[in-house]
Amino acid sequence: QVHLVESGGGLVQAGGSLRLSCAASGLTFNTYAMAWFRQAPGKEREFVGAISWGGSSTRYSDSVKGRFTISRDNAKNTVYLQMNSLKPEDTAVYYCAADHHSRYRSSWSSPNYWGQGTQVTVSS
């Protein structure tokens, strides 16, 4: 059974930083591309960014480009989301997702697996 477990969320002031982690189990981690999404209250789930199976390629939404960085450690079956220069509009539940490595550049409309999410709140 596949599990994706996010951690590292919390409350931070605007301009601050947080690092989220997503620990994966039950899958061959280095054959999956990984992504981060977020969902703010009353809004649809939004793609944040993705990382290729080996970690050599990343892509981001325009809203976080230059502020957020995705990385992964395949030895630890973990993907990270480093969030810097946080803004109140970054407040959301953040989810990680996994999909076959060939879908790294897809729309990520229906990933194979989802985590349960972790809350990030940025105060002004």
Image (cartoon, rainbow, N blue to C red):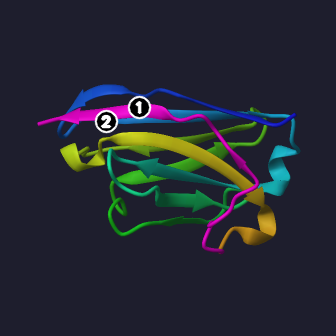
In the image, residue 115 above or below residue 109: above
Q: In this view, does 96 lie to the left or right of 26?
A: left
Q: Which mark is residue 12?
A: none
Are the residues flagged by discs 1 and 2 in contact, CB closer than 8 Å?
Answer: no
- Where does the image place residue 94, in percent across and percent down from the top left? 47, 42
Quadrant in the rendering for residue 120: top left
In the image, residue 58 above or below residue 124: below
Residue drawn at the location 30% of the way across and 41% of the way down: 91
Which span is picked out in magenta? 106-124
Could you say which is closer to the camera, residue 105 or residue 43?
A: 43
- Where does the image place residue 49, in percent across and percent down from the top left? 51, 60
Residue 111 falls inside the magenta stretch: yes
Residue drawn at the location 25% of the way across and 28% of the way down: 12
Q: How far apart are marks 1 and 2 (CA)?
A: 14 Å
What amino acid type is highlighted by mark number 2?
Answer: Ser
Residue drawn at the location 56% of the way across and 33% of the way down: 21
- Where does the image place residue 57, in percent across and percent down from the top left? 62, 66
Could you say which is closer to the camera, residue 114 or residue 22?
A: 114
Residue with the most extreme left position:
124
Q: Residues within 10 Å of mark 1 (few under 14, many from 20)?
A: some
Q: Is residue 38 left or right of residue 13?
A: right
Could you say which is closer to the camera, residue 57 or residue 110?
A: 110
Q: How crowded is mark 2: few (under 14 residues within 10 Å), some or many (20 or more)?
A: some
User: Circle 2 sits on which residue?
Assistant: 17
Q: What element carries label 1?
A: strand
- Where does the image place residue 25, in percent across and percent down from the top left? 81, 32
User: Circle 1 sits on which residue?
Assistant: 119
Sequence-first disc among 1 and 2: 2
Residue drawn at the location 50% of the way across and 52% of the way down: 37
